[in-house]
Image (cartoon, rainbow, N blue to C red):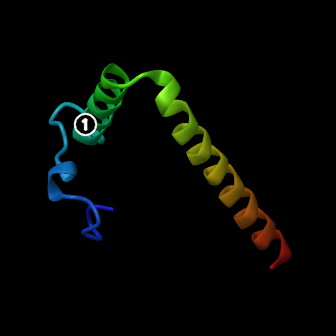
Amino acid sequence: MVDDRILPSVLRARTKLVDGPGVPLLMSTALAIVAVALGDLDAIAPLLTMFFLTTYGTVNLVAGLEALS
């Protein structure tokens, strides 16, 4: 997504020890920790539920369309 310029180029950074997405993983982890620390989990739960249900539905739709084609 960084190559397509959807996300900032900062996320392209790689660690020297491991050729993997170290910086994006750390940033995602930090964002998750901040979200949990600042808010009540009951406030976040409906949003996460809708996200996962939408993702699940989209994956099933794509799999169904692929099976039909």
Picture layout, residue 17 above or below residue 65: above
Q: Residue at x 26, y 32 (%)?
A: 26
Estimate the x, y position of residue 32 in percent, counting from the top left.
Answer: 35, 30
Q: Which of the 4 image quarters holds residue 38?
A: top left
Would residue 60 appear left or right of 9 to someone viewing this image?
right
Would residue 40 appear left or right of 2 to someone viewing this image?
right
* Residue identified by numbered label 1: 27
Q: Which of the 4 image quarters holds residue 20?
A: top left
Estimate the x, y position of residue 4 in percent, counting from the top left.
Answer: 29, 71
Counting every numbered tag in the picture gives 1
Identify which residue, 5 or 50, lies in the foreground.
Answer: 50
Which quadrant does the C terminus fall into?
bottom right
Estimate the x, y position of residue 7 in percent, counting from the top left.
Answer: 26, 60
* Label 1: how many Cα within 10 Å (few below 14, some 14–19, many 20+): few
Q: Residue at x 75, y 57 (%)?
A: 60
Q: Residue at x 19, y 58 (%)?
A: 8
Q: Which of the 4 image quarters holds residue 31?
A: top left
Q: Residue at x 17, y 37 (%)?
A: 15
Q: Residue furthest right?
A: 68
Estimate the x, y position of residue 61 in percent, counting from the top left.
Answer: 74, 64
